[in-house]
């Protein structure tokens, strides 16, 4: 439990201080490391608040959050079907 909280705080700090792609790679790694890492959706909301593009998608302001929901679903499905987990 402490590891999940520490990882979430670290990813939030990464999202605020480093380029977006560093936090995305870290979030993907956490999705495969932790079982059912739904905290990634909260990190997606932080990405939308900081990097959200209202110019490209004015009708859908939470594109990164929806993409994160899809990635969480795919990652949990793939993780459940992998032999080594």
Image (cartoon, helix red, strand yellow):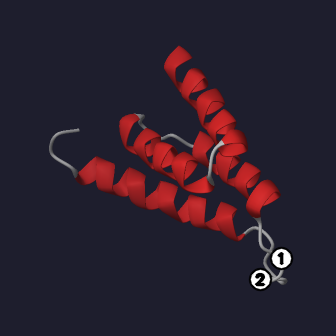
Q: Which residue is mark 2?
A: 57
Name the quadrant containing residue 17: top right
Q: Position of residue 40 (x, y in %)?
A: 59, 46
Total marks placed? 2
Most foreground residue, 36 or 13 = 13
Q: Nearer the viewer, residue 24 or 83?
A: 24
- Apparent side of residue 82 relative to residue 20 in the rendered image (left or right): left
Vertical arrangement, residue 35 with respect to residue 61, above or below: above
Tell me how far mark 2 sits from mark 1, CA to CA: 5 Å
Q: Position of residue 15 (x, y in %)?
A: 66, 44
Query: Which residue lies at the image location 76% right of the left edge and 67% below the top edge?
Result: 62
- Left or right, residue 60 beside residue 25: right
Tell me what residue is drawn at x 82 percent, y 82 percent. 55
Q: Is residue 45 above or below residue 55?
A: above
**What is the crowding at mark 1: few (fewer than 14 residues within 10 Å), some, or many (at least 20)?**
few
The extreme top residue here reads 2
Evaluate if marks 2 and 1 touch, with contact meaning CB atoms under 8 Å apart. Answer: yes
Front residue of 66 and 10: 10
Would you identify the image quadrant in which residue 52 lies? bottom right
> Residue placed at 61% from the left, 54% from the top?
20
Q: Which mark is residue 17?
A: none
Residue 1 makes an appearance in the image? no
Q: Position of residue 31 (x, y in %)?
A: 44, 44
Secondary element type, mark 2 = loop
Q: Which residue is mark 1?
A: 54
Rendered location of residue 27, percent (x, y): 51, 45
């Amino acid at each position: 439990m402490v590891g999940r909280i520490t990882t979430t705080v670290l990813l939030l700090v990464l999202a605020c201080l480093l380029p977006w792609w560093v936090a995305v790679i870290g979030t993907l790694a956490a999705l495969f490391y932790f079982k059912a890492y739904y905290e990634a959706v909260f990190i997606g909301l932080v990405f939308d608040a900081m990097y959200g593009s209202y110019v490209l998608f004015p009708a859908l302001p939470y594109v990164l959050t929806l993409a994160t929901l899809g990635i969480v679903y795919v990652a949990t499905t793939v993780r459940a079907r992998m032999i080594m987990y």
